[in-house]
């Protein structure tokens, strides 16, 4: 499919979703990412590869990951225990200097907001910072803003692995 066409990503995503729908018990897709997850992975992987061959879809072997405990995906790592934040993103947030301008804060919050799900009460912690981005807000980096900045950094550095509840446990 030619890249650059405005509808190409959506069309390709729809194709991939439809092709692998019969395998949805063990296959998840997201645009050109295909995840095969099951205990009988060799047979399921074979089924996926045959489907790709039959439909003339190709995989770049250099981008394939087989038999991994966890895989990188959209700024996170997916594994058998759950989902965790990418340590590189957490490190970038932690090492970010104190914002001097609104645009600096906006950039930092953009990155931090992406990982908000790993931080309990994130919205409440970020409120003093988001107030600084309001249309008529006067830029003044207060101690409250500094505390919020540090609290978010600290919270994300100790981010938990997110997982669904185990219904077998009390």
Image (cartoon, grey):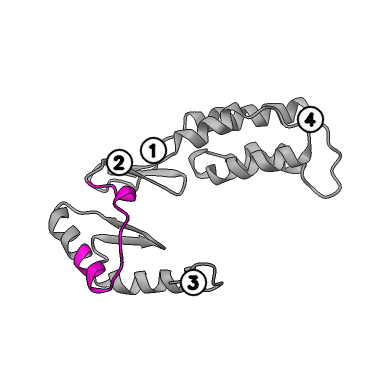
Select label 3 or label 2 by which is in front. 3
Q: How packed is label 4: few (under 14 Cα within 10 Å), some, or many (20 or more)?
A: some
The outermost residue toward the front is 2
Discs 1, 4 touching: Cβ within 8 Å: no
Discs 2, 1 touching: Cβ within 8 Å: yes
Q: CA distance from mark 3 to mark 4?
A: 44 Å
Select label 3 or label 4 by which is in front. 3
Question: Relative to residue 50, is residue 95 depicted above or below?
Answer: above
Q: Which mark is residue 8?
A: 3
Select label 3 or label 1 by which is in front. 3
Query: Which numbered disc, 3 or 1, marks the residue that appears first in the sequence?
Result: 3
Q: Quadrant of the C terminus?
A: top left
Query: Which numbered disc, 3 or 4, marks the residue that appears first in the sequence?
Result: 3
Residue hosting label 4: 141
Question: What residue do we see at 56% from left, 32% from top?
Answer: 92
Q: Is residue 129 left or right of residue 91?
A: right
Q: Quadrant of the N terminus?
A: bottom left
Residue 158 location (% of width, % of height) = 47, 29
Discs 3, 4 touching: Cβ within 8 Å: no
Residue hosting label 2: 81
Q: Which mark is residue 161?
A: 1
Question: What residue do we see at 59% from left, 33% from top?
Answer: 152
Q: CA distance from mark 2 to mark 1?
A: 7 Å
Q: CA distance from mark 3 to mark 2?
A: 34 Å
């Amino acid at each position: 499919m030619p890249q650059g066409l405005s509808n190409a990503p959506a069309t390709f995503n729809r194709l991939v979703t439809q092709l692998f729908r019969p395998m949805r018990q063990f296959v998840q897709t997201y645009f050109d990412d295909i995840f095969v997850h099951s205990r009988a992975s060799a047979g399921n992987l074979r089924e996926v590869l045959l489907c790709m061959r039959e439909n003339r879809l190709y995989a770049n072997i250099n981008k394939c990951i087989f038999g991994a405990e966890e895989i990188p995906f959209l700024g996170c790592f997916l594994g058998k225990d759950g989902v965790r934040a990418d340590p590189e993103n957490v490190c970038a947030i932690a090492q970010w200097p104190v914002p001097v301008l609104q645009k600096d804060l906006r950039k930092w919050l953009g990155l931090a907001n992406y990982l908000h799900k790993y931080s309990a009460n994130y919205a409440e912690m970020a409120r003093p910072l988001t107030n600084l981005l309001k249309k008529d807000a006067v830029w003044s980096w207060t101690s409250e803003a500094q505390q919020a900045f540090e609290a978010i950094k600290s919270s994300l550095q100790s981010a938990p692995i997110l997982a669904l509840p185990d219904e077998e446990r009390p």
